[in-house]
């Protein structure tokens, strides 16, 4: 993500290599146990390969190597451990405790290499890795990885939210005067991600495939790394408060669902149908309609928040974000009581 352009060739190679990796991964998915089987909570009727995430990762890696994008390669290296944790979980179904025990060291590796939060917008820490900086950086990376894992419940939603986040990051960078060129290296990830989105939404005539836990943890940790990198020195192309607006719906939904489960006395990670996308489907909307609606909502709310921060400053942006979250919680718990 250095501030220079990227040639079209690596992007093209990343895009065309994605279906190749996807085909190879689908061929091996059954033997490796990388299949998602139907149950009472799921909407698909037959087993589906969960190799979308690893295919995106491989295509991105190829494009980044050809482009010589050191920062994207660094992001792939950091998120690789989350990909592996997800692959193990896809096959062996790890407990929540084990998943977190594996994810926290993975986040600490990234932080120890220099990618951490020291500037919070309204206040700054010194340049050293303080306990606060380390703790919040781990919470952000692990939290976002799991937030995208939790919203990955219907076609196109998790990857769509990632694409919305990248769109909002580019908007924030342009508001700040950095321009798209400072982020053009991300195109080697965006190309394969869009390809998968079209496959997952059944727009392209490919076999049905899901991200899997490996994919959702990979893209969640990858976007966490991007957001921290872009909002902190040395890149520092977006404001720290802009970060919140880039992932609004995944964060709001995860915090609301966790709060509701705690209120009910159930386990925080006990699977249920309390997510926003489940509620909308239960109202009669189709999977694709809900996915498009929530991605559109994320883009609209996110852009409004970024514009507020640009015009009125970070303090008002943060106040608006907290206000939106309170409104979301009131609506969420109001629906809970009706049920």
Image: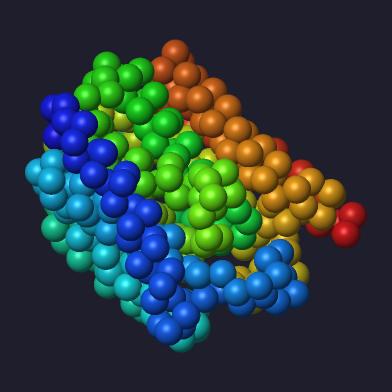
Examine the rendered structure and indicate whether residue 324 appears above or below residue 336: above
Viewed as shown, does residue 154 lie left or right of 299? right
Residue 98 spot, x, y in % from top left: 42, 83
Task: Quadrant for the N terminus, please.
Answer: top left
Residue 285 visible from this viewpoint: yes
Please report the residue visible at 32 percent of the width from the left and 19 percent of the height from the top.
174
Which residue of the protein is positioned furthest toward the top in this rendering?
Answer: 311
Residue 303, percent across and down? 50, 25
The residue that appears at 34% across and 52% down in the rendered structure is: 18
Number of numbered markers: 0
Extreme-right residue of the structure: 338
Q: Can residue 218 be seen in this view?
A: no
**Quadrant location, the C terminus:** bottom right
Q: Residue 51, located in which quarter of the rendered image?
A: bottom left
Seen at 60% across and 53% down, the residue is 155
Query: Which residue is outermost to the front?
Result: 205
Q: Which of 241 and 76 is in front in this view?
A: 76
Q: In this view, does 292 lie to the left or right of 223?
A: right
Question: Which residue occupies 39% across, 76% down?
Answer: 28
With 278 as the anchor, is 33 left or right in this view? left
Place of residue 57 in the rendered image (x, y in percent of width and height, measured from the top left)? 31, 57
Q: Is residue 285 left or right of residue 177?
A: right
With respect to residue 333, does 24 lie above or below?
below
Q: Which colour scheme is used?
A: rainbow
Q: In which quarter of the image is residue 180?
A: top left
The one of 11 and 164 positioned closer to us in this rendering: 11
The image position of residue 87, as x and y in percent, is 39, 75
């Amino acid at each position: 993500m250095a501030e220079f352009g990227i040639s079209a060739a690596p992007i093209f190679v990343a895009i065309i290599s994605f279906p190749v990796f996807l085909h190879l991964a689908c061929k091996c998915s059954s033997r490796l146990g990388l299949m998602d089987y139907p149950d009472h909570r799921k909407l698909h009727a037959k087993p589906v390969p969960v190799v979308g995430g690893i295919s995106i990762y491989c295509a991105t890696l190829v494009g980044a190597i050809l482009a010589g994008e050191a920062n994207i390669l660094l992001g792939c290296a950091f998120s690789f451990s989350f990909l592996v944790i997800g692959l193990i979980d896809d096959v062996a179904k790890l407990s929540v405790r084990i998943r977190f025990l594996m994810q926290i060291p993975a986040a600490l590796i990234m932080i120890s290499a220099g990618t951490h939060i020291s500037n919070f917008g309204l206040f700054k820490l010194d340049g050293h890795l303080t306990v606060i900086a380390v703790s919040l950086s781990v919470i952000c990376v692990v939290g976002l990885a799991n937030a995208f894992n939790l919203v990955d419940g219907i076609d196109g939603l998790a990857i769509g939210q990632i694409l919305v986040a990248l769109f909002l990051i580019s908007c924030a960078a342009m508001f700040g005067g950095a321009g798209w060129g400072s982020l053009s290296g991300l195109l080697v990830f965006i190309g394969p991600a869009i390809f998968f989105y079209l496959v997952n939404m059944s727009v392209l005539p490919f076999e049905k495939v899901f991200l899997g836990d490996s994919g959702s943890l990979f893209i969640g940790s990858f976007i966490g790394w991007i957001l921290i990198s872009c909002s902190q020195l040395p890149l520092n192309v977006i404001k720290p408060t802009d970060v919140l607006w880039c992932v609004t719906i995944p964060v709001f939904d995860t915090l609301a669902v966790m709060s509701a489960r705690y209120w009910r006395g159930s386990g925080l990670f006990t699977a249920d149908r309390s997510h926003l996308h489940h509620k909308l489907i239960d109202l009669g909307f189709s999977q694709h309609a809900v996915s498009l609606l929530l991605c559109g909502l994320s883009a609209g709310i996110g852009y409004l928040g970024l514009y507020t921060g640009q015009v009125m400053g970070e303090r008002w942006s943060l106040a608006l974000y907290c206000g939106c979250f309170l409104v979301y919680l009131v609506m969420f718990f109001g629906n809970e009581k009706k049920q």
